[in-house]
Amino acid sequence: MTVYDWLVLLGTLGTIVAFGVWKARGRQDMESYLRGGNRDKWHTVGLSVMATQASAVTFLSTPGQAYADGMRFVQFYFGLPLAMIALSVLFLPRYFHLRVFTAYEFLEKRFDLKTRQLTAFLFLLQRGLSAGITIYAPAIILSSVLGWSVRLTCLVIGAVVILYTVTGGSRTVSQTQKQQMLVMLGGMLVAFVVIVRHLPPALSFAHALHIAGTLGKLNIIDVSTDLGARYTLWSGLIGGFFLAMAYFGTDQSQVQRYLSAKSLSESRLGLLLNGLLKVPMQFLILFVGVMVFVFYQFNQPPIFFNRSDLARAQASASADHLHALQDAHRVAFERKRDEIWKLDHALGLGDASAIAAAEYDVRQADRTTTAIHEQATAVIAAAVPGANTKDADYVFLSFVTQNLPRGIVGLLLAVILCAAMSAVAGELSALSTTTLVDFYRRSFRPQASDAHYVRAARLFTVGWGLLALSFATFASLLDNLIQAVNILGSLFYGTVLGIFLTAFFARKVRGTQVFLAAIASELLVLALFLRSNTSFLWYNLVGCVAVVGLAGLLARATRLARAR
Amino acid sequence: MASDTESDGKAGEGGPEPPFFRLYAAVAIALVLEIAAFALLTAVYQ
């Protein structure tokens, strides 16, 4: 990090935070603190919805995922634009009509208090845990670049976010998220252009794509019907649709973003902007990863991208073994690079049989480098207890810090920190609002003054922030938990969506019936998770359909019993 | 968008305002075109 990078990084972050706090200046009541005074326009809503979803991991891991596994992950987002349309038609008018602060308030109006508080509790449980992870996951990686400890990195991210979320409330969160999202989109476009310019001048863009495709990185669409395959066209369209419906329609961290809109129309336009931009944005991020992959076909990559774990392994008893593997990796890389240039030459000639032969040789050479990388990973895992062996997470940042010009490094670190901050701010604001509105005001202090509730909301924000920080800073053995918390979200979303859809469309179902159906459906999803290898995207569909179906059956059974 | 804003007052009862149907269609068509482009890219280079 040069002084230019620090200037760009701190200048970008400082300006955004100062602007957000300035926009929310003045005396605040509950309406303005929790709903931003309903002043946000559609572009602020759309960008803040996108910024809430985009965590730092989106920008750190997604390019690495494309590097290692290709672009199939983009299918995960195919259901999202359709969900934005469905939410605009079905959910938004109801929320705006009832003028709710949280999505869960609606459930009490439709069913009863226990259904509202069960759903709000499920939200607090999963979002409270994931707020810690949202801080911790990027801190592990950023700490290695900034030269800080993981704990200090967590503290800096968390403290800044708590400070401006507490100070300005929902309006500051929306305003900062809008600027942060613009920095993220702009930063990734700059990254893409700079990376393409780093490819060998003799290599055309079309040939770069052909090389990526030959090595399996342009596997964007998969039409297989295997339920165990994590990302297919069908799981993305159907499972992804239900996941996006549940996340954007019932997760308060998102609902709060579009409830702060000036009007129903501005809110709808904001969601549609998200529906329009999300797939191209994810495509761009994955495509950046593919271009980084092509770059490393012509420039020697490290045998393991997580340099701190590599250094620890090199200082252990496995140093000689690792050294031998690094030599073998260098030789295998040079052979593969020669084969790739032969493929480039054959492509230039347009000779189909020479191209097919060259593609075969490139794939064979790639198998050798991959096998050596896997051996090195196994050696590092054995030599360094607790090593993070998924080094794809480090590919993008490693590339950025070692190859990009000064100033751009600072900009891309600002992109990642903006993503971390925007996601955490949205989560803390929503956690505080739900605690205040669905529990504190509803069950403990229903008649207090507006000023009292704003003070309480600030205290809840600090409380959730400190809880997330302690979870992030004192949990160094979280690798498996990160995965567990991600799956935790999908385990509950389907059920929660089912409760909302029942509320909207099954007019004869009562509170206790949907409450029992939700508990039975949750058990079904848990059984599916424990007893089958079904991809987690399908849990959203199963949970949702089970709640709607069981609640309907219970309502019918109750009516029949009464008739007798 | 003036007519959309005017209709907000009775948003709870009605369906989407007419101009929104065109926007919904635009978002859905954009998705179909994106998937078609991705399928083409996969078929050509994979």
Image (cartoon, coloured by chain):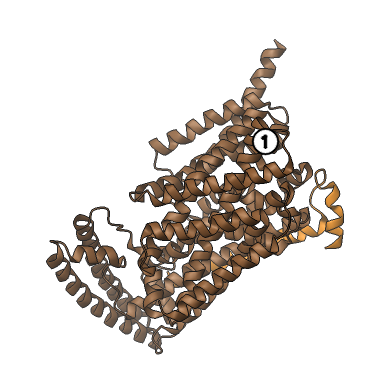
Total labels: the figure holds 1
Q: Residue at x 38, y 64 (%)?
A: A143
Secondary structure state at the residue bearing disc 1:
helix
Dividing the picture into quadrants, the one containing residue A375 is: bottom left
- Residue position marked by numbered label 1 in the rendering: A441
Q: Position of residue A135 (x, y in %)?
A: 46, 55
Q: Residue at x 63, y 25 (%)?
A: A513
Q: Position of residue A227 (x, y in %)?
A: 45, 46
- Work out whether A278 lies above or below A344: above
Q: Position of residue A414 (x, y in %)?
A: 50, 70
Dividing the picture into quadrants, the one containing residue A149 is: bottom left
Screen quadrant of the N terminus of chain A: bottom left
Q: Residue at x 69, y 32 (%)?
A: A108
Screen quadrant of the C terminus of chain A: top right
Q: Amino acid at mark 1?
A: Arg
Q: Position of residue A532 (x, y in %)?
A: 39, 39
- Work out whether B28 lies above or below A210: above
Q: Residue at x 43, y 75 (%)?
A: A291
Please give the chain letter of the residue carrying mark 1: A
**Classed neighbour count for the residue bearing mark 1: other residues with Cα under 10 Å, few (<14), some (14–19), many (≥20):** some
- Work out whether A146 lies above or below A422: below
Q: What shade does chain B have?
A: orange
Q: Tell which chain the image draws in brown.
A: A
